[in-house]
Image: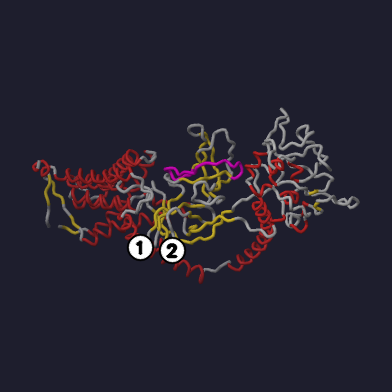
Amino acid sequence: MPITYTSNEQVEVYRFNVPTAILIPLVAVFLQAFVPLKLHFFSIFDLPLLVVIFFAVARRSQVSGMLTGAAIGLLQDALTPSLPIGVYGIANTVVGYGASSLGVKIDVENAGSRLLVTLFFYVVHEIVYFTVARGMVGLTLHWSWPHELGSALANAILAVALFALLDRFKQRT
Amino acid sequence: METFIGRYRNVSILAALLFGQVLGLAMQVQRPTENRPTRLIRIWAVSAVTPFEKGIVGLQNGVAGLWHNYFYLRGVRQENRDLRKKIQDLEIERVRLNEDAEQARRLQVLLGFKEQFISKTIAAQVIGSSGSEQSRSVYIDKGSRDGLKPDMPVMTGDGIVGKVLRVFKSTSQVLLINDQTSGVGAILEKSRLQGVLRGTPAGEIVLEKVMTDEPVQPGEHVVTSGGDQIFPKGLPVGTVTRVSPGAELFLNIRVKPAADMNRLEEVLVITQEEDREPQVADTEHLRASDILAARLPSVPDKPATPPAPGTNPTTPGATTTGTAKPTTLPTTANAKPAATNGSITQLGANANKPANTQSEKLATKPPVRALTGIAPASQKPVASGTKPAPKTLNPASGQPSATTVRRPAPADGSQPANQAPANQIPADQNPANPIPTTPPPQDQPQ
């Protein structure tokens, strides 16, 4: 079993085959665009962001994490007509980089750490998104901590279930 | 330098990626994206995602249709009976409204109005959304292949929904009216106050640019004003739910949209509108005064007294339908009303000035005589009224007041439709509901 060593800690690095690496983000973006039409509350979730975090912590490569984040973010931007392309891209790039950096240092295989990591990076994502959207694009957005923390918790809980599902597609290097 | 980049390779890549995106973002923000071709990445993304959405929506509709149309038919007979009864009721209502509409059209012809018709729509299925809480937009399954173009209005049976933002080959993006980048010209139905409808970050709708001193009540309906050149005038938008003072002397008016933005399934895209003058048969011989006279309260007949020339013998109260027809009217049509040449606003303004031209002279004639030709004895005019006044007078000051609205009460007289110009209709009056706004002067001929 190939193992990489970082700071005297033993962590596993996973990879994904190409169809999986392409299809999972596409399905996530598709579900994010489709499901809120039927279940309006679903718009509180951010499936593409969860997929970015999952790939980043599983691959444990900063370059791979930020590229995945940028690609998925730009795809989200492209489907969001009233926003210029790049707002989600920047936010997801930062999250991809951060999550992969964290994944190198700590174990993110158990449910508890996944919950906390997702909670943290959801808030990071929102902060970056709001900063870019307000500072650069000039959108009028209102920051509400209760709303953001509630959304972060909901996404973190969903992430625990989703990551367990996506673990099936992981391949050990 | 190479060592530095090699040492901080990941951070350098991160910086480069972020810099590239920020640069791209800055270019997009600097140059507005309106009137520019759609970016390739948007086309790719839409092409990749929408086929799945179309497929799933089609499958879902197929299964639901099979179930509802062939299996789940409980209560259909009762529903059918109820609907038949409703159709009968609606048919009666339709006839009544049709007569009103005909009359409104005749007035519009006389006043030189042009009607805006929605002449063509395309039904479309909503197949996806942006998936973002910050952006309120949906995707529909019709595109340029079906004749859709950007900026076409989108609505449901309940009210407007949004406008087409981008058009692809077989799909289109629709920007909803509750998106914060959206703007719709709107007007309050009763108070006729105009404003701009905008979305909020929370997905609500507010009516902006209405001054704080204006009386706006919750429950009032909001319709499109047509001022944005996108939505035709008069389409339902929603209902005022809350009114509070806003910033800079403007009210903050919350509007609940008529269409349910969270449950959009089928929408109509208005693909063609046209301005055309209303077509009414034989309106050439019809005068606004006759139409307005027909609208006045019922007046009993006087069999002993022969009707004066120009008298409309029919009872107006019973005649929103037929009394205004040219055949029942006296043959005074040669004195064509001046209003046929101009708008009511223009003529209403002229009524205050000395009459120089023939049309202005006509415009300065007493309005009630112009409208009805009678002076109801039971009703005292507001002002002393020894002279025919072109408009009402303020009771306190005796100065002309253009805002007093009074309906003359029926008296004993008939309604001679004199050679009165139609241009005495006040400018602020809806031609579709012509009620004379001015009390009669006392020295009117009976």
The kind of residue tagged 2 is: Asp
Task: Please identify the quarter of the rendering in which residue A1 is found.
Answer: bottom left
Disc 2, SS: helix
Task: Say which element carries label 1.
Answer: helix
- The quarter of the picture where the C terminus of chain A appears is bottom left
Q: Give the range drawn in magenta.
A: B189-205
Q: Mark 1 points at which residue?
A: B52
Residue A68: x %, y % from top left: 23, 52
Q: Is residue B194 magenta?
A: yes
Instruction: Find out whether residue A143 is within the magenta segment.
Output: no
In the rendered image, residue B139, in percent from the top left (x then y), is placed at 41, 57
The residue under label 1 is which amino acid type? Phe
**Picture disc at residue B146:** 2
Q: Badge 1, how many Cα within 10 Å: few under 14, some, many 20+?
A: some
Nearer-the-camera pick, B292 or B18: B292
Left or right, B403 with reference to B117 = right
Q: Which residue is drawn at 51% across and 48% down?
A: B257
What's the mark number on residue B189?
none
The mark lying in front, picked from 2 and 1, is 2
Residue A128 visible, this angle: yes
